[in-house]
Image (cartoon, helix red, strand yellow):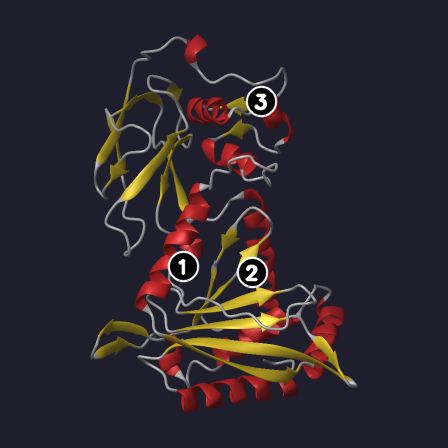
């Protein structure tokens, strides 16, 4: 008899929410089959079976569960007939799990809508993405689990962090020129965000407090390496995956391209989204001239990059810094932004 226990997914949460069972109670499962999804404060994690057998659920969907808790067993004998296993919504369409079908019924959505999804198995999270489409006038709109997690983070940030904000204008013409040269030489797309992430990581040694974590009113923990979170929003929700350590610009470009692909299909795991110690928020719309990012609880700073604007014969972008005033004062902020400005305005290829 195999046991399915909740793993320790991060250090911030003492309990998680069991979102849905991906295999029915009593269903036959095989090794590496997805069994259940758990929601943490940052992401949705999927647990898989470690052996063949029949699933016996011990905890229901929607329940809270703690690390180490037993939530299911996998035994040798089936307890449900094949007819009770998930079935396609339409002939030739994807399989719909029982929790996903229940949510379709709850929201009054036509099961045939899932036929257009590029998945083989429709899970509750897929139905939530369908439901997240802009509502019609006068129609109630249910927030997705992911959006509710974002809301909790934003609320906690505003309640607990006394934030300051300063912005600086940067001539990004040299950085854009460097990005184009790297794109031609490396035959991969390099952009201003890639150079900015590299420049931020480069400042870790000279400005360690900007990457610090406040422990109590007298102590801050200084990290040994920069770990830069970057906002990614491809229309399916806002994510902040983390680029660890100081990487070369081409490696950062590869990592951000990977993140964009994961964002489109909801493929992020807790490992992608935890461990950051500073955040870069990207605001690509050409008409945005300023953005004030939130500071993630447990971090000290968040940096916002707006889209470059014509400024005479050059292109200029505003780079803003939101900072925890308990750890950093205005003069240090000016020095940090000036160092960032200098790096981007010289923009050597070896950033």
- Nearest to viewer (mark 2 / mark 3): 3
For label 3, the residue is 110
Q: Nearer the viewer, mark 1 or mark 2?
A: 1
**Residue at figure coordinates x 46%, y 41% from the top left:** 144
Is residue 347 in view? no
Find disc 1 in the rendering and name its residue. 154
Say whether disc 1 or disc 2 marks the residue closer to the N-terminus: 1
Query: Does 119 sit left or right of 25 as displayed?
Result: right
What is the C-alpha distance between the residues marked 1 and 2? Answer: 26 Å
Q: Which mark is residue 255?
A: 2
Residue nearer the viewer, 6 or 112: 112
Helix, strand or loop at disc 2? helix
Q: Nearer the viewer, residue 9 or 297?
A: 297
The secondary structure type at the circle numbered 1 is helix
Residue 83, can we see it? yes
> Is residue 90 left or right of 127 when viewed as pictured?
right
| Among the two numbered marks 2 and 3 on one chain, the one whose residue lies closer to the N terminus | 3
Mark 3 or 1, nearer chain start: 3
Q: Position of residue 234 (x, y in %)?
A: 60, 51
Q: Position of residue 155 (x, y in %)?
A: 37, 58
């Amino acid at each position: 008899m195999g046991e399915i226990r909740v793993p320790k997914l991060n250090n911030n949460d003492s309990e998680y929410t069991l979102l849905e069972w991906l295999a029915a109670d009593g269903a036959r499962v095989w090794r590496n089959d997805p069994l259940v999804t758990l929601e943490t404060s940052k992401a949705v994690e999927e647990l898989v079976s470690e052996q063949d057998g029949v699933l016996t659920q011990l905890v229901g969907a929607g329940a809270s569960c703690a690390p180490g808790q037993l939530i299911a067993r996998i035994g040798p004998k089936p307890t449900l007939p094949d007819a009770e296993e998930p079935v396609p919504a339409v002939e030739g369409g994807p399989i719909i799990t029982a929790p996903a079908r229940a949510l379709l019924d709850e929201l009054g959505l036509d099961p045939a809508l899932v036929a257009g999804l590029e998945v083989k198995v429709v899970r509750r999270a897929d139905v939530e993405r369908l439901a997240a489409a802009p509502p019609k006038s006068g129609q109630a709109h249910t927030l997705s689990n992911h959006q509710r997690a974002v809301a909790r983070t934003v609320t906690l940030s505003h309640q607990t962090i006394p934030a300051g904000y300063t912005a600086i204008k940067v001539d990004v013409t040299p950085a854009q020129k460097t990005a184009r040269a790297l794109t031609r030489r490396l035959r991969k797309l390099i952009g201003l965000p890639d150079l900015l992430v590299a420049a931020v990581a480069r400042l870790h040694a000279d400005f360690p407090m900007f990457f610090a974590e406040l422990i109590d009113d007298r102590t801050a923990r200084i990290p040994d390496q920069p770990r830069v979170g970057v906002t990614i929003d491809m229309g399916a929700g806002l994510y902040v995956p983390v680029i660890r350590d100081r990487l070369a610009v081409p490696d950062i470009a590869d990592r951000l391209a990977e993140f964009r692909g994961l964002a489109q299909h909801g493929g992020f795991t807790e490992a992608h989204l935890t461990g950051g110690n500073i955040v870069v928020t990207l605001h690509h719309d050409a008409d945005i001239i300023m953005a004030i990012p939130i500071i993630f609880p447990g971090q000290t700073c968040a940096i916002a990059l707006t889209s470059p604007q014509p400024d005479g014969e050059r292109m200029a972008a505003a780079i803003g810094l939101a900072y925890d005033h308990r750890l950093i004062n205005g003069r240090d902020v000016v020095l940090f932004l000036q160092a960032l400005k200098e790096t981007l305005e010289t923009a050597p290829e070896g950033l």
